[in-house]
Image (cartoon, helix red, strand yellow):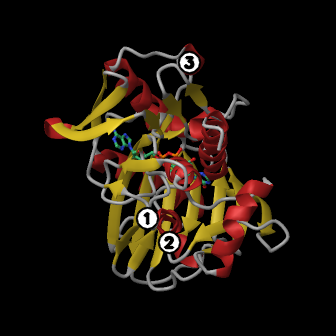
Amino acid sequence: MQRIAIIGAGLSGVTLANSLKEHFKISLFEKSYSPGGRIASRNVEPYSFDHGAQYFKVKSKAFQDLINPLLSENVVAPWQARFVEMCNQGITKQTLWDDKHPHYVGVPNNRAFVEHLSRGLSITLHSRVVEMKKVNQQWALKAEGDAPLGLFDWVVCAMPVPQTQALLAKANLKYNAISDIKMQACYALMLGFEDKMDLGFDAAMVKDETISWISNNSSKPMREKGFNLLINSTNDWADTHFNQNDDWVIEGMKSTVSNIINQDLSNPQFCALKRWKYANCKRQDEQPYLIDNTNKIGLCGDWFMGGRIESAFKSGHQLALAMLKNAHV
Ligand SMILES: Cc1cc2nc3c(=O)[nH]c(=O)nc-3n(C[C@H](O)[C@H](O)[C@H](O)COP(=O)(O)OP(=O)(O)OC[C@H]3O[C@@H](n4cnc5c(N)ncnc54)[C@H](O)[C@@H]3O)c2cc1C
């Protein structure tokens, strides 16, 4: 069996691994302490925050086929949120997210859904790949600390595009097709409160502010314990202020949201900030993956199409189909 290294255990890498595992020997390397990537969750009793992706929708049959069994196993569930759009501190539109157009989340948190899909895969965690080098006809990978990770016939980068480009540059590889794709930052503010608040909504898309999203994370299924809010900055604001320290960002975001929802959020029981340097990218209609048969390199990730969970799935899934076709299996 040919050996494939997949760098990054977000949804695109895990989808690829699951689609190829019958035909190739797959090794996943992940720098973090768990799979999931930007589908991320943090538990701090009694709070549970999804501080990466908030929810997802399903458009394609292939993605629906993946999600259907997860719904039956209660790993994914619809979030029946009271959704609003806000502008100038007022509500401009409201809808109830119902079963007709479901908005899904992982259960009991978003990361759990990718962890579930990762079961049985060979994943080396805490392993940041920092070097890939051709040795004879194979790729030799190294992690931080000069740790050798083995020899592989193929390498697939399933990381955000700037991290992909940086690693490829070490092997003197550059692909023009991806050189102009940019990613933007985002701040996620996590606030936990002793007492519940009624905001009049569960999820709000905010327009014309430095905040883009406010949600009552505890309104998602199976997260009833501690009342908490998850707030996202806009990508532009995070890009502009990415060098500011945490306290400055937290105070700025808390005060902006307090004004928008007309509630005093200055004294939460729990407060933390997550800085996503590579959070999102603009929507584009490129081929959803890249394959270089000469060098035996594959690239996948949401950024081929735009920062959405289904884009990550589609990219990993379609790269897998292309690799299986090449291998005549
Ligand atoms: C704040 C925020 C909110 C979002 N909200 C939504 C939403 O509501 N709905 C939606 O559909 N999408 C949302 N998204 C986007 C969604 O999270 C992504 O589209 C999707 O998770 C991307 O998956 P991926 O596998 O392409 O990349 P990632 O999830 O980024 O996975 C890449 C993995 O590679 C690992 N890695 C990177 N470098 C290395 C290295 N050198 N060695 C080893 N491992 C490495 C990373 O740790 C990571 O686990 C949001 C994203 C963010 C950040």
Judge by depth and name the residue closer to the eye, 307 or 69: 69
Q: If you read the primary sequence from the N terminus, does the residue marked by circle 2 or circle 3 appear first?
A: 2
Do the residues bearing badges 1 and 2 touch, measured as CB atoms within 8 Å? yes
Q: Residue furthest right?
A: 100
**Circle 3 is placed at which residue position?**
180
Quarter of the rendering containing residue 192: bottom left
Question: x%, y% of residue 43?
Answer: 37, 72
Q: Is residue 314 above or below residue 259?
A: above
Question: x%, y% of residue 124?
Answer: 31, 54
Quarter of the rendering containing residue 70: bottom right
Point out which mark residue 3 bears: none
Question: x%, y% of residue 254?
Answer: 43, 57
Q: Secondary structure at mark 1?
A: loop
Going 45% across and 67% down the picture, which residue do you hit?
119
Q: Decide: few, some or many residues near mark 3? Use Cα within 10 Å; few <14, some 14-19, many ≥20.
A: few
- For the question of whether residue 59 can be seen, the reply is no
Query: In this rendering, would 46 be left or right of 72?
Result: left
Quarter of the rendering occupied by the C terminus: top right
User: For the residues marked 2 and 3, what is the alpha-carbon distance in whole angstroms?
Assistant: 34 Å
Going 32% across and 52% down the picture, which residue do you hit?
32
Q: Amino acid at mark 2?
A: Asn
Q: If you read the primary sequence from the N terminus, does the residue marked by circle 1 or circle 2 appear first?
A: 1
**Circle 2 is placed at which residue position?**
109
Q: Amino acid at mark 1?
A: Ser
Q: Is residue 106 above or below residue 57?
A: below
Q: Residue furthest left?
A: 145
**Circle 1 is placed at which residue position?**
41
User: For the residues marked 3 and 1, what is the alpha-carbon distance in whole angstroms?
Assistant: 30 Å
